[in-house]
Amino acid sequence: MKGVLESGRDRSSSYYVDLNVRDSKQKLWGFRCRKRRSGRHPKPWLSGEWLQFVHHYGLRIGDRVVLVREDDDVPVLGRPHYRIEVKRRIVLLGQEILADVTN
């Protein structure tokens, strides 16, 4: 992601990028996506207002989270922003579907 957004390195020796994220209700959330440079688990993780978002929408293990870059919109605070979609697998009338959690 370096070069696309403002990124940096913090005290925990992890690299990060700050993300402006809008939900389906047009609320703006500030997430920080971090990635360790070394170690057994170099996968990225989210911080910032991520936990508030999780509690606000009642996200659960197994929910699918998708961040979509919104290139057509004006950058927020000098950075592009993203749209977040959260889907949950449910069974409705015997059919398995993905329902939107944030609506």
Image (cartoon, rainbow, N blue to C red):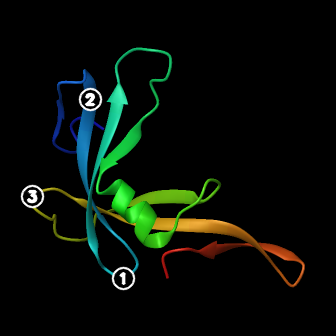
Tell me whether the residue at label 2 lies in contact with that at label 1, contact meaning CB atoms closer than 8 angstroms. no
Measure the C-alpha gap from mark 3 to mark 2. Answer: 20 Å
Residue 55 x, y percent position in the rendering: 43, 65
Residue 44 x, y percent position in the rendering: 42, 35
Tell me whether the residue at label 3 lies in contact with that at label 2, contact meaning CB atoms closer than 8 angstroms. no
Residue most toward the top? 39
Residue 73 x, y percent position in the rendering: 23, 71
Relative to 41, is 93 on the left or the right? Answer: right
Q: Looking at the image, which residue is at 27% across and 64% down?
A: 29
Q: Which residue is mark 3?
A: 78
Tell me whether the residue at label 1 lies in contact with that at label 3, contact meaning CB atoms closer than 8 angstroms. no
Q: Nearer the viewer, mark 3 or mark 2?
A: 2
Measure the C-alpha gap from mark 1 to mark 3. Answer: 22 Å
* Nearest to N terminus: mark 2 or mark 1: 2
* Nearest to N terminus: mark 1 or mark 3: 1
Looking at the image, is 32 positioned above or below residue 39? below
Q: Which residue is mark 2?
A: 15
Quadrant of residue 87 in the image?
bottom right
Q: Looking at the image, which residue is at 60% across and 59% down?
A: 63
| Amino acid on which the number 2 mark rests in the picture | Tyr
Relative to 18, is 85 on the left or the right? Answer: right
Q: Residues within 10 Å of mark 2 (few under 14, many from 20)?
A: some
Q: Looking at the image, which residue is at 43% across and 14% down?
A: 39
Q: Which residue is mark 1?
A: 25
Measure the C-alpha gap from mark 2 to mark 1. Answer: 30 Å
Q: Nearer the viewer, residue 7 or 46?
A: 46
